[in-house]
Image: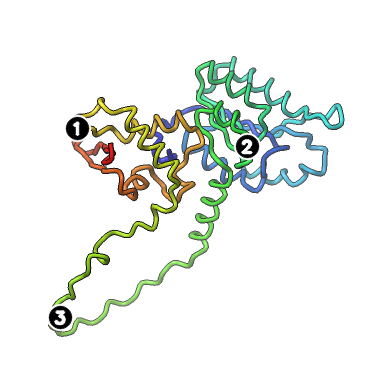
């Protein structure tokens, strides 16, 4: 599911960053991603800031208003940053001032922390690289790959750098020419292109189909709510993100797959909005 499918964007979030295990060049993109899900009322980055490895973080932390938390490495070869971040997370949990946590790290050592925070009823978002071990991914409600954030940021910067198109003067009106009869299109030309579907692995198509099957019977004529399908997929696969396959929303993704039929219906409680339903044509 993509961020656009998440309606709860008013959560108070504590963003805790493992600076030893997170790329600083993506911090701006990470904070923009976090803003989609809620308001980061706590932003902290943990590390031994006296080392050369973290020297380049200073300006990035200032630009994004992130508080650095100093943690000296007491023993060579041991990562004391993890312990400091875990202890701080528990203090924040018991303060009751947040609705959720964002753990920025690819380190599996935070698996227990993510699990504990979820047990306390808080929403846990993990952000890490694709090398992140599966136990940490499974321990989060939602897991976002840094590679996806990096790609989105690159697209945004590219669009921002493009010069604005100048307005052209309207062409002078001329005598309308007689239109020629349009040539009839062949069946191959009229059929919508399916090249985008090739980007979607069979395993993901089966995941969607299986989720529809799990929810079948809750709707009429085998149609089920696309929102419910998205929520179920997120529970099954916390790292599922439509952007990984070139789509900004789940609705656009399923429409590109011939196996599924998508329909819109009027929302009886709000006639101005539409409810989206999906059906598996092979079920």
Mark carried by residue 71: none
Q: Residue at x 42, y 53 (%)?
A: 198
Mark carried by residue 180: 3
- Packing grade of label 1 (10 A; few <14, some 14-19, many >=20) is few
Residue 134 lies, with reference to residue 120, above or below; the image says below
Q: Nearer the viewer, mark 1 or mark 3?
A: 1
* Residue closer to the observer: 186 or 9: 186
Quadrant of the frame with the C terminus: top left
- Packing grade of label 3 (10 A; few <14, some 14-19, many >=20) is few
- Packing grade of label 2 (10 A; few <14, some 14-19, many >=20) is some
Looking at the image, how many numbered discs can be counted on the residues?
A: 3
Q: Is residue 247 left or right of residue 156?
A: left
* Residue closer to the observer: 86 or 220: 220
Q: Report x, y in % for residue 250.
A: 38, 42
Give how far apart the Cα atoms at labels 1 and 3 are.
46 Å
Q: Report x, y in % for residue 20.
A: 73, 37
Give how far apart the Cα atoms at labels 3 and 2 are.
60 Å
First along the sequence among labels 1 and 3: 3
Image-quadrant location for residue 119: top right
Q: Report x, y in % for residue 239.
A: 51, 36
Residue beneath disc 2: 132
Q: Report x, y in % for residue 129.
A: 61, 41
Residue 29 lies, with reference to residue 182, above or below; the image says above
Does the residue at mark 1 contact the one at mark 2 (Cβ under 8 Å)? no
Q: Residue at x 15, y 85 (%)?
A: 175
* Residue closer to the observer: 100 or 110: 110
Residue beneath disc 1: 221
Give how far apart the Cα atoms at labels 1 and 2 are.
41 Å
């Amino acid at each position: 599911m993509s961020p656009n499918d998440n309606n709860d964007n008013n959560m108070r979030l504590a963003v805790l960053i493992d600076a030893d295990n997170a790329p600083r060049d993506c911090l701006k993109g990470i904070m923009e991603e976090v803003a989609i899900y809620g308001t980061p009322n706590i932003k902290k980055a943990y590390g031994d800031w006296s080392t050369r490895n973290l020297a380049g973080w200073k300006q990035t932390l200032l630009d994004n208003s992130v508080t650095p938390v100093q943690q000296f490495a007491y023993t060579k070869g041991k990562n004391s940053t993890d312990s400091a971040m875990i202890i701080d997370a528990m203090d924040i949990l018991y303060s009751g001032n947040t609705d959720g946590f964002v753990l920025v790290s690819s380190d599996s050592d935070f698996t227990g922390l993510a699990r504990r925070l979820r047990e306390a009823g808080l929403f846990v978002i993990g952000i890490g690289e694709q090398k992140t071990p599966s136990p940490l991914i499974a321990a989060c409600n939602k897991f976002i790959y840094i590679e996806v954030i990096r790609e989105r940021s690159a697209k945004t910067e590219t669009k921002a750098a493009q010069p604005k198109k100048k307005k052209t003067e309207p062409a002078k009106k001329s005598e309308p020419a007689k239109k020629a009869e349009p040539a009839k299109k062949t069946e191959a030309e009229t059929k919508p292109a399916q090249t985008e579907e090739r980007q979607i692995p069979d395993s993901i198509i089966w995941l969607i189909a299986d989720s529809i099957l799990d929810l079948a019977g809750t709707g009429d004529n085998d149609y089920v709510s696309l929102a419910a399908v998205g929520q179920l997929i997120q529970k099954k696969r916390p790292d599922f993100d439509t952007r990984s396959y070139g789509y900004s929303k789940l609705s656009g993704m399923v429409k590109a797959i011939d196996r599924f039929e998508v329909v819109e219906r009027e929302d009886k409680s709000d006639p101005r909005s539409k409810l989206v339903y999906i059906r598996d044509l092979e079920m």
